[in-house]
Amino acid sequence: MKNGERIETLLELGMTFDQAKTYLTLLRAGPATAKVIAQVSKIARPDIYRIIPTLQKEGAVEKLMTRPATFQATPAAIVLPSMLKRKAEVQSKLKKKTKEFLGDFKNFHAKDLLEVDSEFAIVPEKEALIQRLKETLLKTQICLDVVTSQRRFSAAILEFEGVYRKALEKGVKIRIATDRHVPLEKVLGIVKNFTRDYHFEVKYFDNPPPTIVTIFDNKEVLVTLTAKAQFAETSSIWSNNTSFIALAQSYFENAWNRASILNNTVSEKAFIEARKADF
């Protein structure tokens, strides 16, 4: 392990940068005076006198009764497991507090999503966007209409497979329109399974869509701000505004009507070869 990696490890275990440098200096140099520690570590001597007591308090450094005073590092085999244990205890307490925090606001958040006064909101990318999509999908009762791109199709199918399955079990009609491409092999299997349910349809059009939209029960809509971005890598606009939804629904219907369904008699292998020929 390189020295930089050792310092990074000590930082993750809870030391400050200067504490880590001081401790490593003592591990390598053995017992040393503050003057020597300062010279080797390139840390000012006044700072060494400030750092040493903090390391002593943590049990990482011992002071030897010599003149001038010298210091030695407590063996790493003792110090690091102890620090790791404390770190684990802190993480455990934090996990418990986080769970309590989420429990306190779980019902409030659900109510907020259902009864929000604002007609428009920016949903951040990544985890926040995925969570919003899952929550809204789970409460969808009638229909889900999606215009997506080949950049997002496979990732979305894999991410929301379970949620789509639950929606289909409720009888939700799912329509997905996307530009022609070669989905991942695993995604082809999932889509083939889903299309056995007449509530699930996928259609393909020729060119990448200018806008990515997801419409829930014709009551809520998510519009992605950057159509060319990868799945969940850009923010989206959420809205329950009826005029905005009408525009989104019109856009979806236009994309859907000019798209075509993959012929079910064509094998998956033939489909892949046909798609490869397109590129």
Image: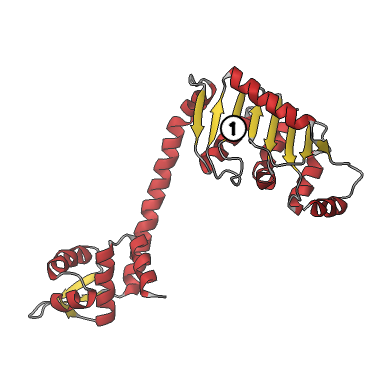
Q: Is residue 271 visible?
A: yes
Task: Please give the name of the residue rendered at 71% of the width and 26% of the height, measured from the top-left corner.
Answer: 143
Q: In the picture shown, does residue 187 fall above or below 247? A: below
Q: In the picture shown, does residue 269 fall above or below 142? A: below
Q: In the picture shown, does residue 237 fall above or below 156? A: above
Image-quadrant location for residue 54: bottom left
Image-quadrant location for residue 248: top right
Residue under label 1: 223
Image-quadrant location for residue 20: bottom left
SS of the residue under disc 1: strand
In this view, the residue in front, 243 or 65, is 243
Q: Is residue 172 visible?
A: no
Q: Residue 246: x and y, percent?
A: 65, 20
Q: Residue 97: x and y, percent?
A: 39, 42
Position of 240 compared to 145: left or right? left
Task: Please give the name of the residue rendered at 28% of the width and 64% of the height, measured from the top-left corner.
Answer: 17
In this view, the residue in front, 112 or 83, is 112
| Quarter in which the N terminus is drawn | bottom left
Position of 141 compared to 66: left or right? right
Task: Please give the name of the residue rendered at 59% of the width and 32% of the height, measured from the top-left corner.
Answer: 223
Q: In the picture shown, does residue 73 fall above or below 160? A: below
Task: Please give the name of the residue rendered at 76% of the width and 51% of the height, measured from the top-left corner.
Answer: 182
What is the crowding at mark 1: few (fewer than 14 residues within 10 Å), some, or many (at least 20)? Answer: many
**Dot 1 amino acid type:** Val
Position of 138 compared to 171: left or right? left
Q: Residue 71: x and y, percent?
A: 18, 76
Q: Residue 252: x and y, percent?
A: 70, 29
